[in-house]
Image (cartoon, helix red, strand yellow):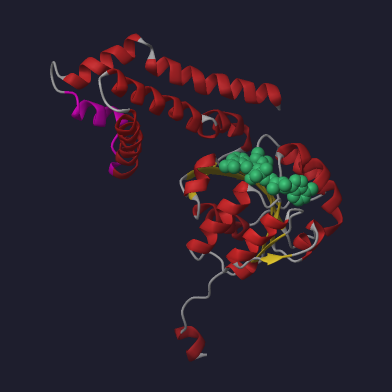
Amino acid sequence: SLFLSMAAPQKDVFKLGFVGAGNLAESITRGVVRSAVLPAASIRTTHHRADRRSLFASFGCRILETNAQVVEDSDVVIISVKPQIVRQVLTELKPFFTKDKLIVSIAAGIKMKDIKDWSGKSRIIRVMPNTPSAVGLAASVFCTGETATKKDEERVSKLFGAIGKVWTADEKYFDAITGLSGSGPAYIYLAIEALADGGVAAGLTRDLALGLASQTVLGAAAMVNQTGKHPGQLKDEVTSPAGTTIAGIRELEKGAFRASLINAVVAATDRCRELS
Ligand code: NAD
């Protein structure tokens, strides 16, 4: 009808369930509700602890009694328990994963093949987010199981887009992704602490040094993200002949700064392969 064709485009509202109402489930819920990807009433979960139930209820989410009820009453189920209990949870919930439901696993190190074996389903999307999800600045990568649809991918892109940036990659890259974006925040925490130590060594107060260090890292990352310039070009633009910045860079190169970061990513990737 004319009325319908003139109405605003219909939003894709679907029912989202969390099995494991922990930190990441909380971050996703906050992001999804804040950015109006879904109304809070479309989100359901359960938890054995009353404080977790009240928290999710305070967002406007529906609180159910069991994981099975969460799965039964959801179109998209995010498995957000710790990796060690994913097997147990998926095995228990196997009868409730009907063909119309998408399983999304965020459990670090749990492969698509395992999720498929344990759930008996292949409509799966595996996502690797990272801890800056807590402040809406996650780097998330997902890969898609055989029978997941384009629409499933769009839904996952929107959900994880609400807590940061999203990429897709083949599952064979997930160990390297873990070594870079999964472990990467810790490398940068070290860098920020060390920059602040340098500031203190050069005479600044600890507070000022730490504030300047973290804001400088944030600013540099935003310059790379927002200007689209290559980081080498940005570096060249701030290093004047015989200036202060090139004197600092020269010291970093003496300490094998770049080789250290390269090797850190490769070592973490190797360790991830060993553990899987
Ligand atoms: P978390 O411990 O905060 O959350 C897990 C929650 O599940 C806890 O509240 C726990 O009480 C609950 N739980 C335990 N057993 C349960 C059961 N049988 N049924 C239902 N709930 C149960 O952990 P998190 O930081 O939210 O991480 C969740 C998953 O996400 C992990 O598998 C982790 O590898 C992955 N992950 C998290 C991040 C992140 O940014 N936090 C990044 C990458 C991957």
Q: Where in the figure is residue 67, as x and y percent of width and height?
A: 79, 57
The foreground one among 6 and 264 is 264
**Residue 143 visible to the viewer:** yes
Residue 245 belongs to magenta span: no
Counting from the top left corner in percent of width and height, residue 269 is at 58, 24
Residue at image coords 35%, 42%:
225
x 60%, y 60%: residue: 151
Point out the stretch of residues depicted in magenta.
Answer: 227-239
The part of the image, by quadrant, that contains residue 223 is: top left
- Left or right: where 227 falls relative to 63: left
Is there any visible trace of residue 166 in the rendered image?
no
Q: Nearer the viewer, residue 211 or 95?
A: 211
- Report the predominant secondary structure element of the magenta stretch: helix
| Quarter-of-image position of residue 275 | top right
239 or 22, which is in the foreground? 22
**Residue, far front:** 205
Q: Residue furthest top?
A: 254
Quarter of the image where ligand 1 sits:
top right
Q: Give x and y (percent) for residue 165.
A: 47, 47
How far across and how far down the image is residue 33, in percent? 53, 63
Q: Residue at 56% of width from left, 66% of height from top?
A: 38
> Which of 71/6 is in front?
71
Give the residue displayed 65% in from the left and 49% down from the top: 22
Residue 235 within the magenta-colored segment of the rendering? yes
Task: Farthest residue to the bottom: give it.
Answer: 2
Count up the numbered dots: 0
Instruction: Judge left or right: residue 38 versus residue 125.
Output: left
